[in-house]
Amino acid sequence: MKRMKTRKMGIRNKIVLPATALIIILCIVMGVNSYKHTENGLIAMGVEEARMAAVISTKVIDAGKLSGLAPGSEDSEEYAELLGALTGVRDDCGIKYLYTLYTDGQKVYYGIDVDSSQNRSDFGEVFEVSYQELQGVFQGEEYVQDYIDSTEDGDLISAYMPVFDETGAVAAIIGCDYDASGVTQRLNGILRQTVGITVTCLICALAVINLIVGRIIRSLHRVDGKIYELVNNEGDLTQTLDVHTGDEMELIAGNMNSLLGYIRDIMINISNNSEQLNESSRMMAENLADAEESISDVSATMEEMSAAMEESSASLDQVNDAVGQAFGAIEEIYRQSEEGSRSSDKIMGNASQVYEKAVKNRRSAEEQAADMAAAVQNKIEKSKEVEQIRELTRNIISITQETTLLALNASIEAARAGESGRGFAVVADQIGKLATNSAGAATEIQRVTAEVIAAVDELAAEAEVMISFMNETAMGGYEKLLETSENYQNDVGSMNEMMQRFAAESEELKHSMDHIRRTVEDIKTAVNESAQGITNVSSTAVALTESVSDIGRKADSNLGIAGQLKGEVDKFKLH
């Protein structure tokens, strides 16, 4: 990996440049402050000397003599005496210019000028400063400059003191120009000295800062070099930073070593977990493959059960049709039995007329007996179709047994499928219960059918007895009708009772067949619902197969990701 560089300003420049600027500012401020303090002190000292010289001059001069002088009195003794006294003060106090001033209220004029050079002002010569500026001094106030005035005559500090006469009036003022050239020279020397000291301190401070920053930068470079080695050493997390500077760099190195140890522990955990994830993904992929195969088998089994249910539904349709036909036949028998009962009642009413109508009705009786025998025989033959119900219920029982076996197989397959087949196990259990209920209903149908067949057999026997009676009694003994009319009435009463019993049995048979018909319809509905449920379960199994396939693909993808993760972790050296 290429070694990276700083994008902007380095740490050295970030520390040195602001520190340098701060030190320069501090040195300038301190130098200027020191110079100003010294300047103020020297100027104050010069001002005080000028004032003291002016005060001394006012003490040694005679105000009366001074006020008596006028222009042209330079050769007088008074002038010479005063000039000598002022000259002594000038020489003793180191004053450059010492002179007296007086005014006429408008201008200021020179009096005695102690200057011994050719530039000395004559008595009465106009002073360069106006009266307005010195008016306060002429009124008794003293004035001393607090600064050095640079003039053509040099650097001066001027002081003006009033000279009072015996009456307390201002006779004149003393002008004292203190020579501040020495102060200026000393200030220039101090300025040069201050600048030199400031530059020296600045250079020393910069040298110290560069030395300290250099040591810090060297420590940072050592830490950076170690980190660079760690980054470019192919993921070796067993290395450590060996820094013993005793400062924050050592703390940073220690924290970096702790961070490397923490990362190493994390990578070890990731390595172990990636291996477990790889193994878990592989096992999940294998289990999903087995589950997909089991679900496919369950789906095929459900398709077989659906086909069996469709066959059961078709058989129940046939049973329902047969039961409907038998129910129609029994209704016809019931109707005819009621008609026979009404006929017997009519015969009972007309028994007294049998004799008169015996001959006339013999043929009619024969025809009616023949028709009744034929009709009863025909209906009895039709009622024997109930036998088909017994065969159909056997088929239903066989189908329910197969359904029970299929439900058992489906429960076994769902148990093999584990958690993913729990819902299917519930469906298989419901199908088994439905098959059991269907078997019970079929058994009930068999019982009711047996009762119907027994009732039909009894009805056939009674019909044969009735037909035999009519043939033997009505036809064979018709000639003895008159003699046996009373007995005939009794026999007709018996036949009436028999017909009523036949009608009651026919009604009971009708109710039983109606119950059978409703039961068969309920079974058909249940079988249809079961078929629909099995179809839904089959669709769900297909969808579950697709979901398991998708999960399998995701598991394969996770297996690949786990392999990649393990490969990435293996790039690091952890032990």
Image (cartoon, rainbow, N blue to C red):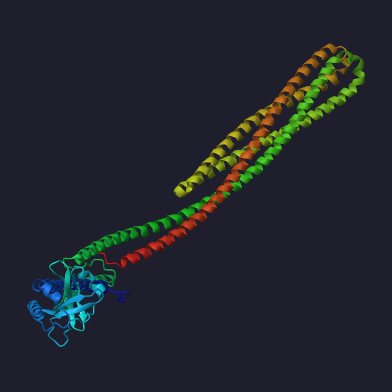
Whether residue 488 appears in this view of the structure is yes
**Of the pair 201 and 350, the residue shown nearer to us:** 201
**Of the pair 416 and 572, the residue shown nearer to us:** 572
**Of the pair 88 and 421, the residue shown nearer to us:** 88
Could you tell me residue 238's position as x and y percent?
A: 23, 66
Q: Residue at x 21, y 71 (%)?
A: 29
**Of the pair 419 and 342, the residue shown nearer to us:** 419
Among the 4 quarters of the image, the one containing residue 88:
bottom left
Q: Residue at x 79, y 15 (%)?
A: 493
Image quadrant occupied by the N terminus: bottom left
Image quadrant occupied by the C terminus: bottom left
Q: Residue furthest bottom?
A: 118
Count of numbered badges drawn on the protein: 0
Up-down: is 519 above or below 478?
below
Up-down: is 393 above or below 571?
above
Could you tell me residue 389's position as x and y percent?
A: 67, 36
Could you tell me residue 252's position as x and y percent?
A: 22, 65
Could you tell me residue 367's position as x and y percent?
A: 87, 26
Up-down: is 480 above or below 79?
above
Would you say 130 lies left or right of 34 here? Answer: right
Among the 4 quarters of the image, the one containing residue 478:
top right
Up-down: is 411 above or below 81?
above
Would you say 547 lies left or right of 559 here? Answer: right
Would you say 144 lies left or right of 277 here? Answer: left
Among the 4 quarters of the image, the one containing residue 502:
top right
Whether residue 225 appears in this view of the structure is no
